[in-house]
Image (cartoon, rainbow, N blue to C red):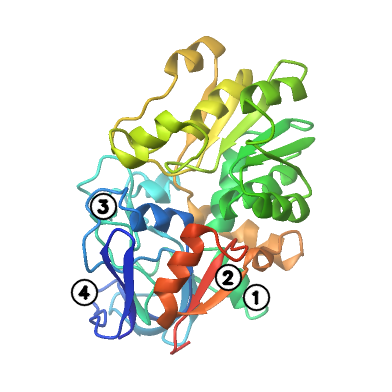
Amino acid sequence: MLAMNFRGPFRVRADRNMPEPQIEHPEDAIVRVLRSCICGSDLHLYHGLVPDTRVGTTFGHEFIGEVVEIGPSLQKLKVGDKVMVPFNIACGKCAFCKQELYGNCHESNPMATAVGGIFGYSHTAGGFQGGQAEYARVPYADVGPTVIPDWMDPDDAVLLTDVVPTGYQAAEMASIQKGDTVVVFGAGPIGIMAAKSAWLFGAGRVIVIDHLEYRLDFVAQYAQCEAYNFNSIGDPVVFIKTQTDSLGADVCIDAVGCEAKGNLMNTVLGTKLLLQGGSTTALHWAINSVKKGGIVSIVGVYGPTDALVPIGNVVNKGITIRANQAAVKRNLPKLIEHVKNGILDPKQIITHRIPMEEVADAYHIFSRKLDGCIKTVLIPPTA
């Protein structure tokens, strides 16, 4: 089959000779992929920043598809169902799944002490092949996959597998109170959705910080928020203090993660020398910009190695930090309703729809932020 094939950092290709997935467990399903996204998290793999990303891996943890084969133990899915597949691979039965912490499933990634299984995200996340392919194997298929409503646009559906739930959970974890000032670091797809979702929880003011003008223009229009370029405002921490009567923001959201720009030392240590789990610049800004007693919500991805974090400031300011991979399945029902009612319109953030055969070009465009790229959707030839 045709699938994306990782050949090493900055090297991916469309390979027509990748093996088709097979039923390996009675609870598996095989889906014919209809849409698959490139995520900012995929770029961490593409850039060689995630340990144990092996040559021959197919990336892609955001995809929808049509069920073409099911294992003998499945009760809920049938062949022909069109489903959105959450990026979390969750068993539904372990201690963490019972708490609806689907991103921390212990059964799907038992060798890890933190994250559960994730499609196409290195062997640190279970070594599962991803959905940037014509077909994908979906474990525990009675747990994660959700049938796509007949009325829903496939482009909206594919964004409900990660981007929308992650941005929404970023705002949810922040425990936003009515009238709060919320600062989002990062104007990529997750930051855009976090900013949009902040209003749903009662924010009185939403500020987004980034350094790419086209993304700032986009988020300002899409999320009806303030947007500032950190290259133009001086020290972002000082700027935010001046905007909040010197107190700091009520909430700060790190939607950037390990490739944050803005501090040379962090960039060199985290993304060049790989001496820490990525550049922690956005996390520093969030911790130092939030008010005393405020909340920092983290959905940006960092590596499993140590990172330089100003923990003393966290303690002395009495900050609450909340972080996790989004539990997609938990929030899907309410997000589907938000899409149905027109409260959220995810597909508006899609700027590029590219054939799967051109996946190498798609990664180059997305990685280099070319052509005004916000979000890329790959279309397999069999879709």
The spot of residue 195 in percent (x, y) is: 68, 45
Which of pointers 1 and 4 lies earlier in the amino acid sequence? 4
Amino acid tagged 3: Asn
Left or right? Give the position of 367 relative to 71.
right
Q: Residue furthest top?
A: 316
Which of pointers 4 and 3 lies earlier in the amino acid sequence? 4
Secondary structure beneath dot 4 equals loop
Of 230 and 177, the residue lying toward us: 230
Q: Which residue is mark 4?
A: 24
Amino acid tagged 2: Ala
Which of pointers 3 and 1 lies earlier in the amino acid sequence? 3
Residue at image point 28% right, 33% down:
275
Residue at image point 46% right, 87% down:
80
Residue at image point 52% right, 35% down:
262
Q: Which residue is mark 2?
A: 157
* Residue 230 drawn above or below residue 285: below
Q: Which residue is mark 3?
A: 109
Amino acid tagged 4: Glu
Which of pointers 2 and 3 lies earlier in the amino acid sequence? 3
How many C-alpha atoms fall within 10 Å of the one at disc 3: few (<14), some, or many (≥20)?
many
Which of pointers 2 and 4 lies earlier in the amino acid sequence? 4
Which circle marks residue 152 in the picture? Answer: 1
How many C-alpha atoms fall within 10 Å of the one at disc 4: few (<14), some, or many (≥20)?
few
Q: Given contact means CB atoms under 8 Å apart, are the residues at marks 4 and 3 in contact? A: no
* Residue 174 drawn above or below residue 328: above
Q: Given contact means CB atoms under 8 Å apart, are the residues at marks 2 and 3 in contact? A: no
Would you say residue 265 is visible in this rendering?
A: yes
The spot of residue 9 in percent (x, y) is: 29, 58
Q: Could you give the CA–CA distance between mark 2 and mark 4, rounded to whole angstroms?
A: 27 Å
Left or right? Give the position of 57 relative to 188.
left
Secondary structure beneath dot 3 equals loop
Q: Given contact means CB atoms under 8 Å apart, are the residues at marks 2 and 1 in contact? A: yes
